[in-house]
Image: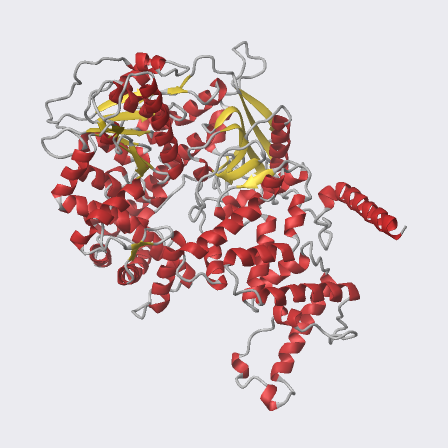
Amino acid sequence: MTASVTTLPAVRWSAAEVSAAIGLPHLPTPEQTAVIEAPLRPLLVIAGAGSGKTETMAARVVWLVANGFVEPEDVLGLTFTRKAATELADRIGNRLAQLRRVGLWTPATVDGAPALGAAVSVSTYHSYAGRLVREHGLRLGYESDTRLLSEAAAWQTAHEAVVRYDGPMDEVEKAESTVTAAVVDLAGEMAEHLQTPEAVAAHLDTVIAHLETLEPGETRRKVHPASTELANLRLRRAVVPIVDRYARLKRSRDAMDFADQMALAARLAMTFDDIGAIERARHRVVLLDEFQDTSEAQLALLKALYAAPGESCAVTAVGDPHQSIYGWRGASATTLTRFAVEFADPEPATKLDLSTSWRNDTAVLEVANHLAEPLRAASRVPVEPLAARPGAGTGSVEVARLLTAADEADHVARWLADQRSRGDVSAAVLCRKRAEFATVTAALEEHGVPHEVVGLGGLLLTPEVEDLVALLHVVQDPARGDHLVRLLTGPMTRLGIADLDALAAWSRHQQRRRGGDVARHERDLAPDAADAPSIVEALDALPPEGWEGPEGERLSDLAHQRLAGLAATVRRLRGLTFLPLADLVLEAERALGLDIEVLSRPEYTPAAARAHLDAFGDVAAQFSASADRATLGGFLDWVKAAIDEERGLDRGYADATPDAVQVLTIHAAKGLEWDVVAVPALVESTFPAHHLHSPSFKGGQWRISAPKDKGWLAGLQDGGLPYALRGDRDGLPDFGWPHADGWDDLAARVESFAVAGGEHAVAEERRLAYVAVTRARHALLLTASVWSRPKTPRVTSRFLDEVVGLVVPAESPAAPATVRRGPWEELPVPPEDGSPLVKPGAEEGTEFVWPVDHLAHRRTRAAAAAAAVGAAIDGAVGTTEG
């Protein structure tokens, strides 16, 4: 189709007529109709949260087919997840089947049978890139059967590259795991922005040399104003050769990761014009879902394929700049705003809106629009506020500020219990960071609220999975006494302080024997290389009865009995390490009695009770299927990386369910929705996330400074690709290092860059807040606490303060408040004498009971159940004897 053809032939059926003919319950709105009936040319659709974009995309395809403008096989749909791809494909397929039944469309036939190609192609962006690489990769020397590495296998390969690297590492004084994470992150960024290690190294060399040789000029400074930043850049420069080694290692094994695959597909499309011609002939209509989450490599790929000079392709990009929350993994909010120009034919793409929310009640919508107002004001593409659907409910939003984090979690649990008591409702707790999970889940357990932690990183922090991982560590490595302590103090062994002290004394005694007065052939030939005392080894050979340590330490008989049982369990599992990982995990689960323990909670359905254990078993099975070295040690290394990585290595997506409250991060909640949602820990430095943890009391209130973010000038873990090498650099703060005139000017540029970076980071956090709020259909709870881990009060999040501003005073004659204020603790005022504030719970005389009673919150029910089982057993025995 040429650029001059922008209108459709004669329309036989309107969007409303097609909708009515196939029996849909609602006719399309005017906004939806405009999108459905848009001309076959580039189109940008700004679709707000819950605005029915999937329905509208499906309706557009059905309308085009019904009017004979395209055949189903002419259409390509791309999404980010298999779940979304399946949903879109099913919806289109069902509508086309209905279209055929009512006689509005007859598929093409071959010898009287429907053509095999009579179906829309819907896949993920990565699957589509994979097909291009398989079909055309040989042109750049890549075999069609090149192996695609999973995250686990990629991490293992990067770790191998780090360990084997023999180049200069004078600048790098970091742990192997830290360097491995940096290599994986930097390699991913380079692929997403189509950069090579050589280009990155050359750019860093130029920046470092320029800053090092910058003339001081007229200044009183004695130290280079960018000395810290220079150290960070040198460190990153030292890692670039390892990134190159990582890339070569993958290539030598005919392997690539997902980022490599996308970059290679983009290179192919940009290098060989005929690939684009083939794809444009194959797909006349292209639908791009969640376009705000695309990376520069994806944008380059799609532009090379479907934006040919002199041609117009019906590419429709659907997205919402307010929901661009994956910048840390390569997504760029600017790809959406640049679409209209990048896909011009030659006129810029038409821009349409979907702004009616079919998900949220009015109270939730008002809060969402209020939080998004600064985003709308700064957006390069106009975004309409969300409007309520016809007949939308009022909904409810509550804000609360409690004294402590424990009080806050208790309030959240009570609120959720109350919401769930009203019927079958789906519910979620959305946390900015996984560190909040433990407090929340403990409160939910205390109140008997069934819950499920979603995502690998959070899953690994649940009590039953932590116990399981601890046992596997002890089985794998005798030096992991830290994990053994969890088992010793947990519900299976439950040792007290005196018994733990005795076991440690026995461990030291064994260590002395190995290097002391024993036979020469039994002694360590290199005492200086001997291992430190290990309580895991002490568990393998327990002290004889009656043994006493040098200070009178001794194991109680009960402790000896329990330790012997644990030792037998560890020995048995060590003998089973030949099993597949999933089977070994199942054996460890049974050995700890976790399979019975989780099912003993009456408030859970069996599926919900086993959710965490089953999910961990799935993780082990997936690791076995995808990792290069599916050993127990390799698996535990991978697990540690998943715990350390705040945002990555997650298991993907879950479905909302009324069986249990789902606890997950906001990043993992994208694309999901629940009837009721709670968002806790709305305090500065947690949400929004930044590094300012210590507020000061000024002008009668607690304040924090403006957050700062040094971006690519930061350290090894927080830095990344220099902005000048990123395709989205126009949307990022500019350091302006080439234009610095002396040290004072450079210092000012570093400061202004950090401030601009802080503002940029807070804007991303605001988008995250918008996503969190719009997950709730009917009821929303936003909470904060005055005190948590720090020794000073927490400053309430700016986002929560903005929502509190919507609360209408009780004495006001205005309309009923959109937001209801729940319990609201005031922030403390420091004593006038300058003495420090006393944090609640830190007062002298606070008592702690050891060992912890792990059944304390449900002992009454557990004891009654145990008595009933015991009575039944006694009755059965009596009957047998009689």
Vertical position of residue 32 compared to residue 525: above or below: above
258 with respect to 506 (left or right): left
Nearer to us in this view, 842 or 496? 496
Q: Quadrant of the N terminus?
A: top left
Q: Position of residue 320 (x, y in %)?
A: 34, 29
Tag count: 0
Q: What is the basis of the colouring in this image? A: secondary structure
In front of the other: 531 or 744: 531
Would residue 784 be found to the left or right of residue 799 on screen?
A: right
Q: Note whether residue 688 is visible.
A: no
Q: Quadrant of residue 356?
A: top left
Q: Is residue 142 above or below residue 125?
A: below
505 up-or-down from 445: above or below: below
- Name the spot of residue 83 as percent of width and height, x first: 40, 36
Residue at the bottom extreme of this rendering: 520
Please identify the quarter of the rendering in which residue 574 is found: bottom right
Q: In the displayed structure, would residue 524 be above or below residue 585?
A: below
Query: Is residue 10 or residue 761 the one in the foreground?
Result: 10
Q: Residue at x 62, y 33 (%)?
A: 411
Query: Taking the image as drawn, is residue 873 in sight?
Result: yes
User: Image check: 472 left or right of 860?
Assistant: left
At x 61%, y 24%, the residue is: 423
Residue 58: percent from left, percent from top = 33, 25
Given the current orientation, which residue lies at the most extreme right position?
A: 882
Q: Residue furthest front?
A: 111
Residue visible at 25% across and 33% down? 117
Residue 361 percent coordinates (x, y): 48, 19
